Image (tube, helix red, strand yellow):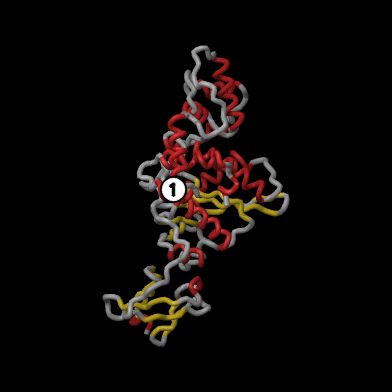
């Protein structure tokens, strides 16, 4: 999983930032990071005493010096640009400010510095237009999930799986997968849920393993998420803008990390993903977040992941029907389609308020309605 490749210093930095967010449950956060409360509070104390950046190995050079000259400032700008070739003037300035730089030029002047050194893509800069942005009100209300297009590596292909929080743009999972199978996605989500908790809903595309089509939205993966109490939403077919934040995240990943690079194997991909993910979440200024990084708006979910699903319970008045291999049930001498994702499971048929109408339920999930008057 992604965090198993991350250094201890990276995990400490992420822990401190999450622990200082509003409403955090310190005990739960320590448990998710696999540390004791004593260790967690020790990291917090060190962060306060040794500020500004006590948990990494960067230089402790003062962020401001009265003798600093304009050439030195320009050199610092160019150095950061060399580390992040896809960043524009606004991101560079915001990041340098966050690192404590003083006496920085205006964005327009910084842009001229990039242009003077031949580092500005004039066509790309001219064609950019401000996007319309819509987001959920709080973290963990909605996570977006999708595979980025796979790419070749020396030992086969890599299928990057990304999970993004809609409110904060925080990247919760960036996994280098060997395939796009349900079991692969579930393994990645289990680790993500254990670390960050569970969202209220998840938005994903159509097609395996997400959902077959608008008339058949359930897959075995979707049923698992529903059992966990997570609402499953699907984007409109052939409308990738429904998952615009995830699509934009994948474009950024491609531009800042993947473009022009070749990887030997999946572990090499994962190491590169982990390094880039740390920068994206904790450092990279985001224009949709007033040039703050995603960590500034994210906090972990209070919904803890259950290691074992509770058995489904039905009322004594329910009629229980097994789902056949073809996804159908047999009720009152008639066959009704439910979903093949539930084959060999049992669903409940429950009388509704209107005579002749019944609801078909899998636990608390209403799958469809049956009107016997229309069927006869």
* Residue 30 relative to residue 115: left or right: left
| x then y, percent, for residue 265 | 69, 50
The correct choice, above or below, for 50 with respect to 341 in the image is above
| x then y, percent, for residue 232 | 44, 60
Residue visible at 45% across and 38% down? 42
The answer, for residue 173, to whether it is visible in the render is yes
Q: Can you name the residue that lies furthest to the bottom here?
A: 333
* Residue 140 relative to residue 177: left or right: left
* In front of the other: 85 or 129: 85
* Number of dots carrying numbers: 1
| x then y, percent, for residue 291 | 45, 33
* In front of the other: 118 or 208: 208
* In front of the other: 337 or 297: 297
Mark 1 secondary-structure assignment: helix
The correct choice, above or below, for 338 with respect to 137 in the image is below
Residue at image mark 1:
29
């Amino acid at each position: 999983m992604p965090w198993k490749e991350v250094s201890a210093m990276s995990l400490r930095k992420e822990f401190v930032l999450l622990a200082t967010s509003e409403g955090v449950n310190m005990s739960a956060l320590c448990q998710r990071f696999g540390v004791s409360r004593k260790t967690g509070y020790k990291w917090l104390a060190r962060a306060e005493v040794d500020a500004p950046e006590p948990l990494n190995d960067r230089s402790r050079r003062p962020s401001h010096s009265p003798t600093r000259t304009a050439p030195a400032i320009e050199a610092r700008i160019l150095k950061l640009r060399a580390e992040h070739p896809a960043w524009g003037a606004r991101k560079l300035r915001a990041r340098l400010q966050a690192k404590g730089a003083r006496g920085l030029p205006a964005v327009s002047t910084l842009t001229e510095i990039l242009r003077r050194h031949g580092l500005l893509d004039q066509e790309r800069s001219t064609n950019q237009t401000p996007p319309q942005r819509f987001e959920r009100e709080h973290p963990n209300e909605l996570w977006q999930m999708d595979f980025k297009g796979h790419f070749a590596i020396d030992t086969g292909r890599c299928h990057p799986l990304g999970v993004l929080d809609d409110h904060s743009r925080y990247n919760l999972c960036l996994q280098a997968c060997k395939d796009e199978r349900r079991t692969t996605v579930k393994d990645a989500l289990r680790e993500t849920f254990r670390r960050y908790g569970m969202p209220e809903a998840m938005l994903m595309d159509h097609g395996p393993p997400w959902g077959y089509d608008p008339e058949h939205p359930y897959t075995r993966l979707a049923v698992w998420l529903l059992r966990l109490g997570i609402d499953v939403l699907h984007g409109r077919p052939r409308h990738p803008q429904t998952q615009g934040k995830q699509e934009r995240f994948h474009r950024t990943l491609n531009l800042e990390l993947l473009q022009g690079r070749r990887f030997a194997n999946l572990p090499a991909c994962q190491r590169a993903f982990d390094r880039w993910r740390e920068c994206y979440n904790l450092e990279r200024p985001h224009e949709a977040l007033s040039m703050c990084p995603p960590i500034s708006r994210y906090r972990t979910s209070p919904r803890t992941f259950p290691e074992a699903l509770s058995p489904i319970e039905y009322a004594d008045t329910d009629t229980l029907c097994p789902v056949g291999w073809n996804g159908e049930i047999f009720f009152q001498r008639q066959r009704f389609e439910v979903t093949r994702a539930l084959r060999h499971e049992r669903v409940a048929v429950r009388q509704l308020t209107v005579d002749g109408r019944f609801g078909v339920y899998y636990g608390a999930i209403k799958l469809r309605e049956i009107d016997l008057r229309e069927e006869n």
